[in-house]
Amino acid sequence: MKDTKYFIGLDVHKEKTSYCVRDKLGNILIESEVATLYSELESRLKPYLGASMTGLESCTSYYTIYQNFLKNGYHIKVANTIQLRQLIAKNDKLDARRLSEMLRLGTFPCSYIPEEKIQHLRSLLQVRHSLMEEKTRCNNRIQAFLDRNGIVMPDQEAFGKKWRQQLLQYIGSGEVSLELRYEYDHFVYLEEKAEHLGQEISGYTMKHWIKEYRLIQSITGFGPILSCYVIAHILPINRFPSNRKLRRYAGVVPAFHESGGKKSNGHIPKTSSRKMLRWALIQAANAAGRTNTKLGRYYRKKKKQKNNAGIAHVAVASSMIDIIYKVLTTNKPYNPRIC
């Protein structure tokens, strides 16, 4: 903005927000903190907002503030926290100062803010993901109880049909404690809730992104739910200039470090922009690895070469990102003979 006179940095938290206002020369005009309410922020910053650029960090509390600034016609940016460098000294006041200075100098690392439909889909998936994580913990508690009490179960996949039938027989016999009964009831409840929510998520995705939904499901390993994870975290695909950028975003390419002429690589970063996206890709890679397809054969080849299933999963997930990028940019379903 050519008419920008002020640069406002906001460090937003659940209860309070620190703010700092600078002029073009970098002088701090005002700085303080206020309750995290748009009405409070607008009241304090009203003299500057008309000719200002505002920046804040991405966090759990930023979205409502961000939307209110946009609706009232104010220029606002959200920082990509992964690209922000950690300072030696850090507190809310310094964060607000730093953001305002980066805006003034033009070094503010902007973050992509999804449209409301994508944001809603992400929220639904987060709820489902939490249900699935609790279901896994409940699963582990049930199996730990069986081991502690010496209850021998059939030599079959845990929580499969026959395994469950045997477990229900134990529960119905009255020879087990209430602990196991309530744990199993809780497991069934979580399973039903997750299944119902999954149907809601699939319906919502089909309503808004039916074409992309079908394209992704054409790829080996991607079912109705995993396709929703991809849509929620990748669309719109045109924000990625290349498949390499998409791979890096998903966290399925090895990071490398170079210093003093020495290079080290092969390490997959523990954190990525979208951990849930990477989880979905690994799940799809695992499913594809059990098939007699091109991706399945590639998985088994990598697993044999590296003697490590985890490395094979990541390798297949990386290939899947390339396929996803191609089908979404060309609007053509996956053809294993070509891809």
Image (cartoon, rainbow, N blue to C red):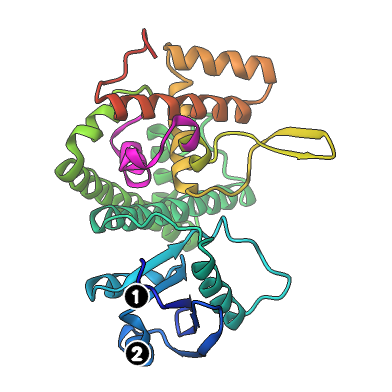
Specify the amino acid type for callout 2.
Pro
Q: Nearer the viewer, residue 318 or 256?
A: 256
For marks 2 and 1, the one nearer the N-term is: 2
Residue at image x 53%, y 39%? 248
Secondary structure mainly formed by the magenta segment: helix
Q: Is residue 226 visible?
A: yes
Residue drawn at x 57%, y 55% as measured from the top left: 83
Counting from the top left corner in percent of width and height, residue 142 is at 52, 51
Count of numbered labels shown in the rendering: 2
Q: Identify the residue at horizontal 38%, vertical 73% (top origin).
A: 4
Position of residue 51 relative to residue 263, above or below, is below
Q: In the image shown, does 124 or 249 lie closer to the viewer?
A: 249
Left or right of residue 306: residue 83: left
Please give the label number shown on residue 50: none
Name the residue at 25% across, 59% down: 116
Asked if the residue under mark 1 is in contact with the one under mark 2, i.e. CB atoms within 8 Å, the reply is no
Residue 295 falls inside the magenta stretch:
no
Per the image, the residue denoted by label 1 is 65
Q: Amino acid at mark 1?
A: Ile
Which residue position is annotated with label 2?
47
Q: Nearer the viewer, residue 339 or 19?
A: 19
